[in-house]
Each structure stands twice: as structure tokens, then as C-alpha cells.
Image (cartoon, rainbow, N blue to C red):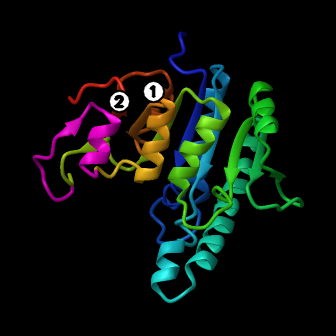
Amino acid sequence: MALTYRRVLLKLSGEALMGDLSYGIDPAVVDAIAKEIVDVVNAGVEVAIVVGGGNIFRGVKGSAAGMERATADYVGMIATVMNAITLQDALERMGIGTRVLTAIAMQEIAEPYIRRRAMRHLEKGRVVVFGAGSGNPFFTTDTTAALRSAEIGADVVLKATKVDGVYDSDPKKNPDAKLFKSLTYSHVLNNDLQVMDSTAIALCKDNNIPIMVFNMMVPGNIRRAVLGEGIGTIVGGSCEIS
């Protein structure tokens, strides 16, 4: 089997772990995601993951409710670590060595983020889950995904969502919304398309890291994305708008 990508950065939202719950983590959903990741790892792909924390706490929402923004963001970072170690547990129950590396020191439950250590884990076939965002308030986990992908030399950022890709309008409101198969970074930035936040897009643009936006709710799509089967939307410097 020919691999399109050898090392990938998978960006999962915290909400992806909720399933149909209104809050928290659905173990069945986590196991389903883990099984797809195991399949990819067993195919010989090195996998790093950045997971959000919106299923538990979202800093922006806490700030809007009156919390000091930096404090709210730190609480959100801690929520991402809860999701990270939950993913680690699911993957290791399936026989895949996994390491959680956090940008905020939590030595009793995770390793500190050290770039060379992360790369060494990947080279040894372990899944690396990055927790606590970038360790800085005011930055999203999308930006963390772009940053970590550049640091570890990932071939692509796989942005897992609940829709089929990037549309020209909201497909939930407009049944005639057009799905883009490919876009340039500049088009995404200039038209404020909701792929990732602008800082994340700019980081990927500066480092020439393509972004694939795809629907993770379709079984097997994580594997298809890694194999470059043309699902979803690809954002890149050499892409034509289509």
C-alpha cells in the first residue's frame, strides 16, 4: 500500500469526543476514533494528535461569562489534557504505544513537551498526543496544531470535522452550498473561510503544510485522508480553487 503521507498531525475537536452527549466524553466514540487511528498506525504512518477541550470547557465562552480571559484559557488547556489521556487510554488498550506531551507541566500524568522527544516517540511508532494547547492563553488548539505540525515536520494537518469539507456557505442553512475540493491559503484568509483560525492558516502557509478538512463522522475517513484518497477539502499553496 502506497502512503501519501508518512507523518501526519490529526486535529480533533473536543466536541468530536462527545458523540451525541451534551457534555463530556462518550467512551464509545473515543474507542471508534482510536480504532481508526490504530488502523493508520498499523499501515506504517506516524501519527501525532492535537485535541481540543470544548466538550469540557471553552476559554472564550468562560471569558464571555465574566472570567478573566487568560484564566479561562488555562482552564481550557487543562480540559484538553483530560481528553488527551482519555485518547491515550483507548489507544493503549488496543495495543498502540501512546505518549501524552503537555505544554503545561503535569509530570504525574504526562511528559513535558520537548520537540526532539516528540519526534523520537514518532520514530518509534508511538502515537503522540499533544495536550494543554501551546501553553499560552489567547491561542487556539488550531494554532497549536499548525505549530506542532511545523515543529515535528508533519506532511499534512488533518482537520477532522463533522462536515464533508469547506463550503462557500453554511451547508446546514443553504442546501445549494458548494463544497470546495481544493483552496489556496490566500483564498481562505482573504475570504475568512472557517477552516482554522487565521493564525493557524498563516503558520501552515509560511511552512507550506497542506491542510485537509474532512468529515470524521464517516467510518474509515481518517484512513482515507491519510491515504490521500481525495476526500474533503485540501488547502495548500499550489492548489487551484475548485
Is residue 74 visible in the rendered image? The answer is yes
Q: Does dot 1 land on a helix, a strand or a loop?
A: helix
Residue 232 in view here: no
Q: Is residue 13 left or right of residue 91?
A: left
Residue 209 drawn in magenta:
no
**Could you tell me residue 69's position as x and y percent?**
55, 78
Q: Quick check: 206 above or below 177? A: above
Q: Kindly identify which residue carries mark 1.
A: 224
Residue extending furthest right? Answer: 108
Residue 56 x %, y %: 58, 70
**Part of the protein shown in magenta:** 172-192
Residue at 80 percent across and 44 percent down: it is 114
Q: Which residue is painted at 52% across and 62% down in the image?
A: 18
* Residue 67 x %, y %: 56, 86
Looking at marks 2 and 1 on the same chain, the residue that comes earlier in the sequence is marked by 1
Element under disc 2:
loop
